[in-house]
Amino acid sequence: MAMTGSVFITGGSGFIGRNLIETLGDDYDILAPSHAELELLDEEAVAAYLGRHDIDVVVHCAVRPGHRAARDPSGQLERNLRMFAALARCRERYRRLIFLSSGAVYDERHYGPRVSETAFGRHVPIDDHGFSKFLCATYAATRPDIVELRPFGVFGRYEDYTIRFISNAICRTLFDLPVTLRQNRRFDYVVVNDLVGVIERFFTCEVRYDAYNVSAPRTWELLELARLVVGLSGKDLPIVVANEGLGVEYSGDSRRLREELPEFAFTPLQESVSRLYDWYALRRESIDRGSLLVDK
């Protein structure tokens, strides 16, 4: 299936959107209007924008953040639904909509090891973020032109190092600070470069399912990752775990994705973390040390 037009990316200033633009910008005609240029909550403005451009694929990354560092987490449910609906209603103006979802659709109260896509719908997420993704996913399943991708843990350059574990650990070691975690937990981490590679393949590949978990071959305990980062630093720094025990695992079964993209190989996590460490080391002067001292 050949590309016939532009790739429209929402949330282009965010973590994943920025990586998409930077990685794919030389190979595709990318449209990524800022919030000032296009208000995604305005359905008529969205329709007019799509109508003015020859768009082949839409990648919907924009989201109202609700994490602990969000300036204003209010209105997540309505805003996330309205942004998605404004795009979904314009189905005649693109060939495919790739909806960047999350493992949160499975409900944080019922996370577990290697959750399969078939578990979707067994529980309704209790949080606004997960519930908004759940409702969008429910609608997306009725549309053959919408593909939902469900990554779990994503890390890499441009993420918020004040709250995202791997980047936070790296930045702390650069300033000789201890690596801290609230509780050890097993996570399913994918480096953002690999997520971009998966998204790109879904520009043109044939799809057999409405939704795909985007999961790496193995999971990692946060404590393992902390030790990996401290080892890369070459320093003798403490690792502080606030609460004992192992928390609930957050990971997905990726068999569907492997069936669809059998040739795709995920980057070994050790290699990805090492590259990210070097990336931050080159930008140490731009890191706000003070923000690392605030427990978010």
Image: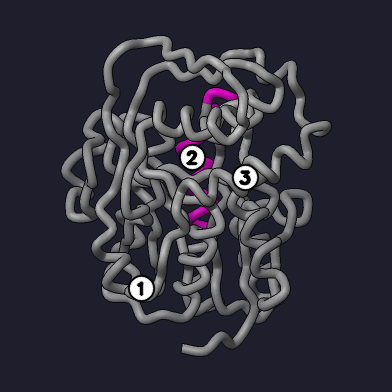
Circle 1 sits on which residue?
261
Please provide percent x and percent y for residue 197.
51, 66
In the displayed structure, 243 sits above or below 162; it is above
**Residue type pointed to by label 1:** Leu
Q: Which mark is residue 236?
A: none
Circle 1 or circle 3, nearest the eye = 3
**Residue type pointed to by label 3:** Leu
Circle 2 sits on which residue?
78
Please provide percent x and percent y for residue 228.
49, 34
In the displayed structure, 248 sits above or below 259; it is above
Marks 2/1 in contact by CB < 8 Å: the verdict is: no
- In the image shown, does 164 or 219 lie closer to the viewer? 219
Mark 2 / mark 1, whichever is N-terminal = 2
Q: Quadrant of the C terminus?
A: top right
Circle 3 sits on which residue?
276
| Residue 296 in sight in this render | no
* Colouring style: one colour
Circle 2 or circle 1, nearest the eye = 1
Circle 1 packing at 10 Å, graded few (<14), some (14-19), many (20+), is some
| Residue 62 in sight in this render | yes
Please provide percent x and percent y for residue 48.
67, 68
Q: Which residues are magenta?
A: 68-86
**Residue type pointed to by label 2:** Glu
Using the rendered view, name the quadrant where residue 72 is placed. top right
Which residue is located at x 67 percent, y 54 percent?
A: 18
